[in-house]
Image: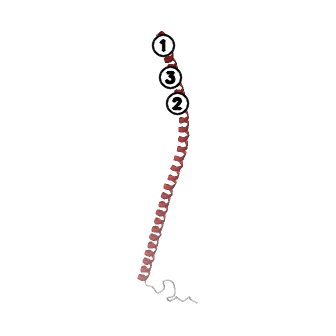
Amino acid sequence: MPKKAKKGGGKGGGKTEEEKLLYLQQRAQAEEEMAKQKEEILTQFLKDKLQREERNTAVNLMKLNEGWRSILRQTRTTELREDITVLSQTFERRLDALDSIIKVNDQILLLSLHAGHQRV
């Protein structure tokens, strides 16, 4: 028995070539719009992600700089305290030396005054 040809009912059945072409154009246009929209969403997502990364980078850089400055301050404080100790010791030695020079000069002055009174 020969098979009967189907009328209508099939996919694209009953459509003229023009209708099929129009359908394919609309479908291609819809797919193109979906691809464009998907690309825009992806672009916006990547821009947002980049912005977050830049903000996080700035925050982390500030944290690193603050930590580095703290370490430098601690090191510098230690160095300055050592310098103060050395300078204080040097000052005390110089002060003691000058004090002994003053005492020697005072004794010489007293001796010369005492000797001057004995001559008179």
For the N terminus, give its image quadrant: bottom right
Residue under the image location 52 percent in, 52 percent down: 63
- The residue that label 1 is drawn on is 117
Mark 1 or 3, which is nearer the eye?
A: 1
Quarter of the image where one finds residue 29? bottom left
Number of marks in the image?
Answer: 3
Tell me residue 37's x, y (percent): 45, 71
Figure coloring: secondary structure
Instruction: Find the distance from the CA under tag 1 to the CA under tag 3.
Output: 22 Å
At label 2, which amino acid type do we have? Phe
CB under 8 Å between callouts 2 and 3?
no
- The residue that label 2 is drawn on is 91
At label 3, which amino acid type do we have? Ile
> Along the polypeptide, which appears first: circle 1 or circle 3?
3
Closest to the observer: 71 or 46? 71
At label 1, which amino acid type do we have? His
Closest to the observer: 7 or 86? 86
Instruction: Find the distance from the CA under tag 2 to the CA under tag 3.
Output: 16 Å
Tell me residue 18's x, y (percent): 41, 82
Closest to the observer: 92 or 81? 92
Tell me residue 34's x, y (percent): 46, 73
Q: Is residue 90 above or below residue 106?
A: below
- The residue that label 3 is drawn on is 102
Tag 2, which secondary structure? Answer: helix
Q: Is residue 26 above or below residue 80?
A: below
Q: Is residue 119 above or below residue 61?
A: above
